[in-house]
Image (tube, rainbow, N blue to C red):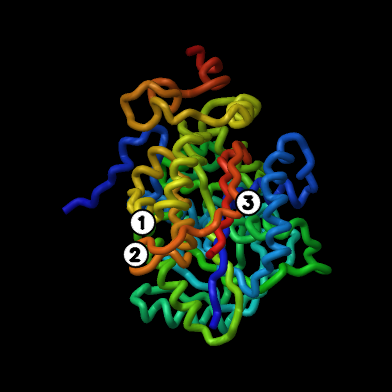
């Protein structure tokens, strides 16, 4: 059967993609940030998954105000990097895994989560920046991402956005779905976005290092409590765009120590943890958790 | 019964909820059109004519022409949509976010490098942090206005 062996958490700041694409990673401003992912790139090589289930949010790219799905799963064979207004990022096309994605869609919907199924969409920096951070710089034509990716887009742009609790429960349903897939494959689940940042108004530039790190501790060690943090705490403490962190709870909820909404058994292994301020407007958080 | 909106008392912050989205529908859809290179070129060639193709309010059009992102947001714009205007102008997210504070680009960048804006005094309207209404605009913007 298929199994989830690890979860990866990372911010997905667009400026990180720009720094990579313009080969600025060794500049003084960016070097400390990319150094925080050196371990992760090696870890990806040593623990190469067969499929990545990548939770991210679309930033008004594939989904304008025409349609706003709360949870959307990509079931396509491939996804092109989107032109977000600056031209598309020069990174490889993202190959999907239609069989596993369709299987997860069916299983999760039958567990009472009403997903939107997407067969055609471009993927923006929310998805490609985490891939670049974990896989390094790749040639858009000659290279390929190390494995297929199932994009899973969460609406955190227009309120109402899903609660942390709902995301945490969804993660549990996704794990059950993966484990009922017959093929023997190794799946990683990634939660992306955050950490504290605000891109608007007089409060733009808000960073809350202490809150971020306390939240990260809670997410790793007591995800049941972390899932209960209400939206307003994210907005007030981590900035209006800090709400993206609810997506990390989908990945955390899919780990082996979460069963029937409670923690049981040993905590996952923290293979790596990193925090850095700033990347453009944003506090960057990153962690890798391995199932025991 | 009215919906609970606990986020209304956060200073310097407009949450993009269904109410804002209704206000800003055409403004944001106009922004989305700038994801196509040919539309970016047409917009830059004659901004007013391009805006007039959209059923936006006159005030929304003026806010776009002025590149006043705070004004755009008050009229229902959302930053991820408004970012298409910035991209069309060749601006980064940092330049766009900074422009909403009154600070110069350098001041805003330095604030971020120094660890960002503190949350202290900026959690609720009525405190005394730098994002509070009575302390706007910030940085170079405050000097320009002779405050």
Give the camera-side residue of A168 and A95: A168
> Mark 1, residues whose alpha carbon is within 10 Å: few (<14), some, or many (≥20)?
many
Quadrant in which the N terminus of chain A appears: bottom right
In percent of width and height, residue B76 lies at: 41, 47
Label 3 marks a residue whose chain is B
Q: Is mark 3 on a helix, strand or loop?
A: helix
Q: Can residue A192 be seen in this view?
A: yes
Q: Mark 2 points at which residue?
A: A261
* Place of residue B19 in the rendered image (x, y in percent of width and height, measured from the top left): 33, 51
The image quadrant that residue B42 belongs to is: bottom right
Pointer 1 indicates a residue of which chain? A
Mark 2 surroundings: few (<14), some (14-19) or many (≥20) residues within 10 A: some
Asked whether disc 2 touches disc 1, contact meaning CB atoms under 8 Å apart, the reply is yes
Task: Provide the residue designation for mark 1.
Answer: A224
The residue drawn where x is 48% and y is 13% is: B147
Same-chain status of marks 2 and 1:
yes
Extreme residue toward the left, this view: B1
Q: How many angstroms separate mark 2 from mark 3 (CA)? A: 51 Å
Residue at 55%, 20% in the rendered image: B139
Query: Does A253 sit left or right of A191 as displayed?
Result: left
Q: Nearer the viewer, residue A207 or B48?
A: A207
Q: Label 2: chain?
A: A
Can you tell which of label 2 and label 3 is closer to the viewer? 2
Q: Assess disc 3: are there few (<14), some (14-19) or many (≥20) residues with their C-alpha within 10 Å of its C-alpha.
A: some
């Amino acid at each position: 059967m298929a199994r989830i062996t690890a979860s990866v958490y990372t911010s997905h700041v667009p400026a990180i993609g720009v720094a990579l694409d313009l080969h600025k990673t060794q500049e003084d401003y960016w070097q400390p940030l990319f150094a925080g992912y050196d371990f992760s790139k090696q870890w990806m090589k040593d623990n190469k998954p067969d499929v990545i289930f990548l939770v991210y949010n679309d930033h008004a790219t594939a989904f304008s105000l025409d349609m706003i799905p709360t949870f959307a799963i990509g079931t396509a064979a491939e996804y092109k990097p989107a032109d977000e207004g600056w031209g598309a990022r020069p990174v490889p096309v993202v190959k999907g895994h239609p069989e596993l994605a369709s299987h997860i869609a069916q299983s999760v919907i039958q567990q009472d989560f009403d997903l939107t199924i997407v067969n055609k969409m471009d993927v923006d920096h929310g998805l490609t920046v985490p891939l670049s951070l974990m896989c390094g710089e790749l040639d858009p034509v000659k290279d390929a991402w190390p494995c297929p990716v199932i994009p899973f887009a969460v609406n955190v742009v227009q309120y109402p956005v899903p609660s942390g609790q709902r995301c945490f429960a969804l993660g549990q349903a996704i794990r059950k779905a993966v484990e009922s897939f017959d093929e023997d494959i190794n799946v990683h689940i990634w939660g992306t976005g955050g950490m504290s940042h605000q891109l608007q108004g007089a409060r733009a530039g808000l960073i809350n290092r202490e809150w971020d790190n306390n939240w990260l501790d809670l997410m790793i060690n007591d995800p049941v409590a972390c899932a209960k943090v209400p939206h307003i705490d994210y907005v007030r403490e981590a900035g209006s765009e800090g709400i993206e962190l609810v997506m990390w709870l989908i990945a955390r909820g899919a780990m082996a120590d979460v069963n029937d909404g409670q923690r049981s058994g040993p905590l996952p292994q923290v293979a790596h943890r990193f925090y850095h301020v700033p990347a453009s407007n944003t506090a960057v958080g990153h962690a890798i958790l391995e199932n025991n | 019964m009215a919906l609970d909106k606990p986020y209304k008392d956060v200073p310097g912050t407009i949450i993009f909820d269904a109410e804002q989205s209704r206000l800003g529908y055409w403004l944001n859809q106009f922004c989305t059109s700038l994801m196509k290179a040919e539309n970016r070129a047409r917009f830059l060639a004659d901004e007013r004519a391009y805006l007039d193709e959209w059923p936006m309010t006159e005030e929304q059009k003026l806010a776009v022409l002025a590149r006043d992102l705070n004004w755009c947001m008050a009229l229902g714009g959302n930053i991820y949509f408004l970012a298409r205007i910035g991209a069309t102008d060749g601006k980064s997210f940092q330049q766009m976010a900074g422009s909403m504070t009154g600070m110069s680009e350098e001041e805003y960048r330095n604030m971020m490098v120094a660890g960002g804006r503190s949350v202290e005094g900026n959690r609720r309207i009525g405190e005394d942090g730098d994002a509070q209404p009575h302390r706007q605009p910030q940085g170079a913007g405050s000097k320009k206005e002779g405050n």
